[in-house]
Amino acid sequence: MTEGMVMNLVRLLLYLVGMIGFAAFNAAYLTLLERKQASWMQLRRGPTEVGPWGLLQPVADGVKLMSKQLLLPRDVDVPLFLLGPIMVVVPPILCLVTIPFSETLVARNFNLGLLMIFAFGAISTFVLMLAGLASANKFSSIAAARIVAQNIAYEIPLLVIVLSLVMSTHSFNLHTIVDQQAGGFWHWNLLRLGTNPLMPVAFLIYFICLLAESNRAPFDMVEAESELVAGVFTEYSGMGFGLFFIAEYVNIVVGCCLATILFLGGWHCPFGLLPGLHWFLIKMYALCVMVVWVRWSFPRTQFYGLLNLSWKILIPLALANLLLTAVMLKLF
């Protein structure tokens, strides 16, 4: 093994450790953000007891989860039941490896990075379904069936929207897509109305699909407490449940990172007052705040309403956006 190969391997391992730390930090403190933001919206105080302003509350929650026993209910499929929490958290962390947080900060710049993210996203859906079926619980089985129907419905408009952006940028490389949006706000894909007047609509469709794909309210059919106790997670306890919880928030981070790259210019900003990494994180966390805001503002929709929204509204709009993109590229 040459010295260059060893250095590349060490670099990749260091980035992977960094991504795991980044994912754990976000999973911990996005829960605190959610609880604080919900309390502000409902005129409550939220967590205040553990640490100054409640900043150590996520640490206390993590210690509590790790101290609890992982129970194995009777009749479960033991291998799938135990592998479910592990396999559901691995794909979103691997997605972070190919995301460029700045012009130089990226673990591995894959030419097909965009395709890689959606491939790993499909694995997460599959693992959630298997975890529900392996639990030998009727509520978990119903939630598993809902996961399949929901993700099939919302991956179609999501992929069609992303396909229209790939047609515009001629690349699956996330770094290249960001580079093409340099030069000012008007060069961001969200505001590039000359190439596609429906681009703000495309961003709205993407954001709705992000909520559905990450199983967030009003599309949280995976964990519908009022109907399914805790859905797929009903039989999980301790860190088994905790890993599902971490995966949900890491998926939110991945989705918001991808929205920043595809629509908001990535690390580019015309002001130039801060380094590119800071602008990327500002945009990404602003989208995370919007995700939390939606959860505490809208009630959970009925399951059939959720499917009708996708098949009758979002998919036709996404196809219209794709067709308009093709026409605009051909004419101009």
Image (cartoon, helix red, strand yellow):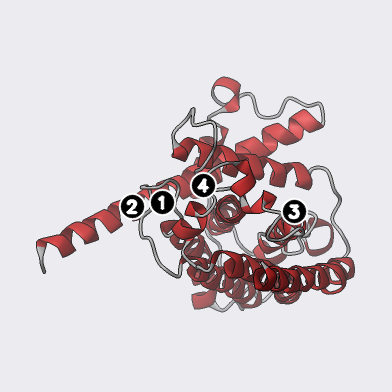
Which residue has dot 4 on it? 182
What secondary structure is marked by label 4?
Answer: loop
Callouts 3 and 4 close, C-beta under 8 Å = no
Q: Secondary structure at mark 1?
A: helix
Marks 3/2: CA–CA distance = 34 Å
Residue 209 placement (x, y as % from top left):
72, 62
Can you tell which mark lies on residue 11? none
Location of mark 1 (residue) = 19
- Tell me the quarter of the image containing the N terminus: bottom left
Callout 3 crowding tier (Cα within 10 Å): few <14, some 14–19, many ≥20: some
Residue 200's disc number: 3
Mark 3: amino acid: Pro
Q: Residues within 10 Å of mark 4 (few under 14, many from 20)?
A: some
CA–CA distance between discs 3 and 1?
Answer: 31 Å
Residue at 63% from the left image edge and 54% from the top image edge = 189
Q: Give the vertical position of 15 relative to 303 (above or below).
A: above
In the rendered image of this protein, does residue 291 appear above or below residue 224?
A: above
Q: CA distance from mark 2 to mark 4?
A: 26 Å
State left or right for residue 201 relative to residue 165.
Answer: right
Q: Amino acid at mark 1?
A: Met
Residue wearing tag 2? 15
- Residue 277 lies in quadrant: top left
Q: Report, in whole angstroms, how far the alpha carbon at label 2 lies from the one at label 1.
A: 6 Å
Residue at position x 36%, y 60% from top? 108
User: Taking 169 as reference, is 261 above or below it?
Assistant: above
What is the spatial separation of the Cα atoms under label 1 and label 4, in whole angstroms? 26 Å
